[in-house]
Image (spheres, grey):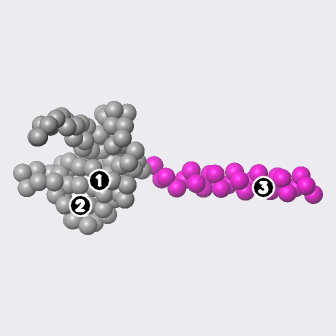
Amino acid sequence: MTSGIAITAAVLTLAGAIALAGCGSGYTRVREIKPAPESFIGKEVRLQGAVGKPVDPARPDAYLLRDGSGEIMVVTRGGLPAQGSEVAVRGIVRSVVSRGVGWSLELRVEETERLR
């Protein structure tokens, strides 16, 4: 009887681990990118979240995407999604050094496909 309980516990533990592994659903969180951008630059990521405000009227192709862990600029080749809508995108993480008051590293995702 004890070995039956141990086997049942092992099966349930394995099933739980498999279920939790699926929770990530293949999307990268902004909080994963921002602290270590060098490991993401030039790589493809999938992001999902709410569309924030457009970045700048001078950049009609860019908006902020907020996923609950942070926000990142997304540059799109298509039209801007409606502010407040939920989107999922696939894109390449890029960086550019910008100069304002000082030098800063600006991250963006260049959208290659809008998944929803």
Residue visible at 76% across and 51% down in the picture: 10
Q: Could you say whether the residue bearing mark 3 is in a helix, strand or loop?
A: helix
* 116 over 103 or under it: above or below: below
Residue 40 visible within the image: no
- The quadrant in which residue 33 appears is top left
**3 or 1: tag closer to the N-terminus:** 3
Q: Which residue is mark 3?
A: 9
Q: Nearer the viewer, residue 38 or 19?
A: 38
Do residues under tags 3 and 1 come within 8 Å of each other at their CB atoms? no
Q: Label for residue 71?
A: 1
Q: Could you say whether the residue bearing mark 2 is in a helix, strand or loop?
A: strand
Residue 64 x, y percent position in the rendering = 23, 55
Q: Nearer the viewer, mark 3 or mark 1?
A: 1
Which amino acid, mark 1? Glu
Mark 3 Cα shell of 10 Å, populated few (<14), some (14-19), many (≥20): few
Residue visible at 78% across and 55% down in the picture: 9
Residue visible at 33% across and 53% down in the picture: 70
Q: Quadrant of the N terminus?
A: bottom right
Q: What is the span of residues highlighted in magenta in the rendered image?
A: 1-26
Mark 2 Cα shell of 10 Å, populated few (<14), some (14-19), many (≥20): many
Residue 11 x, y percent position in the rendering = 75, 53
Q: Label for residue 52?
A: 2
